[in-house]
Amino acid sequence: MTLIDLPDTTPLDAEAAATAAPAVAAPGARPGLVLLALAMGGFAIGTTEFAAMSLLPAFAPDLGIDDPTAGHVISAYALGVVIGAPVIAVLAATIARRTLLVGLMVLFALGNGLSALAPTYGWMLTFRFLAGLPHGAYFGVAALVAASLVPRERRTQAVSRVILGLTIATVVGVPLANGIGQLVGWRWSFGLVAVLALLTAAMVRLHAPLGPPSAGASPLRELGALRRGQVWLTLATGAIGFGGLFSVYTYLASTLLDVTHAAPVAIPAVLAVFGLGMTAGNLVCAWAADRAQMPAAGATLVWSALALALYPAATASLWTLVPTVFLIGCGCGLATILQTRLMDVAEDAQTLAAALNHSAFNVANALGPWLAGLALTAGFGLPATGWVGVALALGGLVIWAISLIVDRCASLPGRA
């Protein structure tokens, strides 16, 4: 297969198509190896993002802080993602994509390596923020590179291979990092992620196409994405609609112990089932999106709302909770669909729009647990987190419907 950098993966504009620069492939490069290298980066990012939550009880006493305070370490990483994604995407607009990906993975390795050496709580906050900075930009640029390797009708499936690294991390990487943390100390877990990041940087440098930026690329042009209403509607769909998954995931361990009355040993297994659902949803939704993108997004939101509606009743028994958790995890496929949707609505501001997708999902990661926490504070109980999730999924569905209506109105005769 010839490696061609499509016009920022969105051949919607004839002028953009004419000015797009072709990718320069490394000798003997193969799309399979490129996607594997990009997915390895997703695996490293997914491992540190989710494992840090499970390692909180381990590093809190070591740094001389309590668990609630240690939670700010998780927030520092998320803040780094939200800030880093747009800032890096704009400032690095004129850098070749392969060079940018290598640099982002080196920065990610540095942030995690320093996290492993953090002497105090203050330094840990700083290093986790640093580690979060390249997260969104990496996934955004990696998605553009992945999409450029295949025909347009297979873009979403190529993007799903990158995100597959993250979903597999929830099944394999997180338990591995947690086990290492329990056996030899939490610092080694962050060290493992740093090593994975350096391996990713090496593989990307060896196998990925250079992918120079298109003619006329500039920070100002990237900022143009923020003037497009469909970009904001797509980001809002993810920020709201995806929050339902996190409203349940955040309190799943507590629900297993306090409502389902499962043994603590069941928690990793159920979280792994959640990860399997995320992996399956990622692959199936990508396949569907390459055939009907917007219908696939709407169907995924409906699926999430229905699965989350089953959750409150399912918490009574492991036999009902486990399959329900799998079904909820399948809603993760929305991330892949919206990643490609942004390629279609961002026009010539591809990098910023693609990176912002992960800022939006980190907003969902904060919004879902916060609203679920309000429900718990109001006394509704842990099963009610499912109803919070339903409300968020339906909220995302409303925004999706508005986006669809705007699309159809724009396509009417006489409308530009």
Image: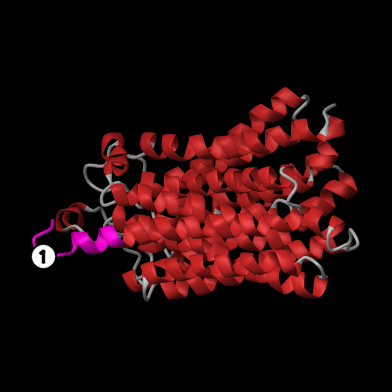
Q: On the rendered structure, is 261 left or right of 76?
A: right
Q: On the rendered structure, is 214 left or right of 343?
A: left
Total marks in image: 1
Looking at this view, is 84 or 29 the one in front?
A: 84
Instruction: Return the residue at label 1.
Output: 413
Q: Position of residue 111 (x, y in %)?
A: 63, 35
Residue 43 can be seen in this image: no
**Corner quadrant of residue 173:** bottom right
* Residue sitting farthest toward the left: 414
Q: What residue appears at the point 73 percent right and 36 percent down from the top-left corner?
A: 71
**Corner quadrant of residue 407:** bottom left
Query: Which stretch did the figure color magenta?
Result: 405-416
Q: What residue appears at the point 40 percent right and 55 percent down from the top-left corner?
A: 399
Vertical position of residue 24 compared to residue 329: above or below? above
Query: Magenta segment: does it hold 409?
Result: yes
Q: What residue appears at the point 62 percent right and 54 percent down from the top-left corner?
A: 388
Q: Position of residue 126 (x, y in %)?
A: 64, 27
Vertical position of residue 330 compared to residue 345: above or below? below
Looking at this view, is 149 or 391 the one in front?
A: 391
Q: What's the amino acid at mark 1?
A: Pro
